[in-house]
Amino acid sequence: QAGEAVPVAQRSSWTSFLKSIASVSGDLSSMTAPPFILSPISLTEYPAYWCERPELFAEIGNATTSEARVLAVLKWFISTLKGQYTSRNETSGSEKKPLNPALGELFYGHWPDKNGRGKTDLIVEQVSHHPPITAYVIENQSKGLKLVGHNAQKTSFSGGSIIVKQIGHAVLTVKLPSGSEEKFLLTLPRLRIDGLWYGAPYIELTEHSNVVGDGFVGVVEYKGKGYFSGKSHTFKATLTPQPGMGGASTKEIVVEGLWHQNSKIVTGGHGPFHDVSAPKEEVTAVGGEAKGEMGPMETRKLWELVSKGIREGDFDTASKEKTRIENEMRQRRKDEVASGTSWELKHFTPIASDPLYEELGKLAKITPPTEDAYVFKGNWPESLRPSN
Ligand code: HCR
């Protein structure tokens, strides 16, 4: 019996949705879910969560030692988690099912320069539809920072929860004043989606992720509320300096706390570490075409009527529009097969293995030992990088 958070009229479709999740594992994105759980936002907008505290991102570029830099990277990384994994609960009461992006879907945005932090720009492109893979680049040019990454998910069902294994990684490049570069490898936590039968899904992070670079191996371990004890959204991050890897530091640093609230350094120093009680700053979306207009593949243009329908509770229009887009995309793929062509990505080039993932991943014994990646072509639209 579906829980009370599910509108009465949608209880039976929610129960069948959950039953089909339990039997179909792998990719949930294309499954039809009842209206109350639909988000009007496409997954291509999610990479913006990486920079909703742009001043913390900029701080990485101000650090002058390896230790200060890795701490700044860790602080920014931990501070993104609240937005990445709890913001749908805050805005719409529970986790929602995002719109499943079309191949080639685009999202452009920026955070303006304020208080000397520099402007930060974002490009997102859906580089695969089946399975869904989203690639992104976030750059603060004036601080010498560039984050390039991609994201995919493999889902399974266990003990009444959806388990989401995140596939993909991100590499942060930091340009130093000397002209040399430091690179950081970031890997992603596993998610457990609980509260399903009740009809109010929410996320807990599990297992661990890594922050590796500048002579340090960082492991962030995640724990949630246990049956008898423990608090939701707990983490412990350990930064271990690697002998002979350049970093002058020899001491291990440990940070503990709640990723959606605050934390402190408990070993190798002391005092407050991160604190995300201040409001975050949403990205300003821009069009990527001439004069800043949005092209037909830009997410807010492509899904305009579907999103409007979902927001206004007009699910008939939302569903008709969604079917129209999906049919158009299916036809496009068929035409490509017939003409022997394939869709050309606009901003990214796929590579079968990422040498940096392999090199830094080895230090932290990350599995799998090799992973594919998407290299940014460097082609910023005029609306984000005016040439004059
Ligand atoms: C798993 C998820 C799609 C992927 C979303 C990701 C992992 C995408 C990358 C972001 O950086 C972080 C992120 C946050 C989201 O929480 C996560 C989504 C949560 C639900 C959604 C499923 C495909 C939909 C499941 C349907 C449920 C809500 C019933």
Image (cartoon, rainbow, N blue to C red):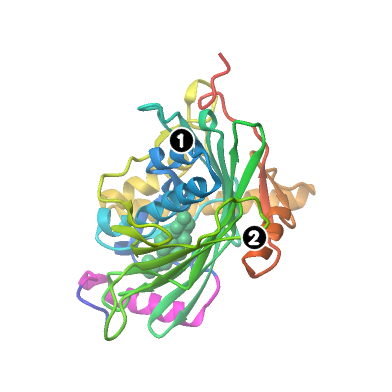
The residues colored magenta run 5-26
Q: Residue at x 35, y 27 (%)?
A: 115
Q: Which label sits on residue 109?
A: 1
Ligand 1 location (quadrant): bottom left
Q: Quadrant of residue 257?
A: bottom left
Q: Residue at x 49, y 82 (%)?
A: 23
Q: Is residue 155 left or right of residue 333?
A: left
User: Is 53 within the magenta?
Assistant: no
Name the foreground residue: 96 vs 7: 96
Name the foreground residue: 12 vs 269: 269
Q: Amino acid at mark 1?
A: Gly
Q: Quadrant of residue 87?
A: bottom left
Name the foreground residue: 93 vs 19: 93
Residue highlighted by disc 2:
243
Q: Secondary structure at mark 1?
A: strand
Q: Residue at x 33, y 67 (%)?
A: 233
Q: Main secondary structure of the magenta part?
A: helix
Q: Amino acid at mark 2?
A: Pro
Where residue 309 appears, x then y in whole percent? 32, 49
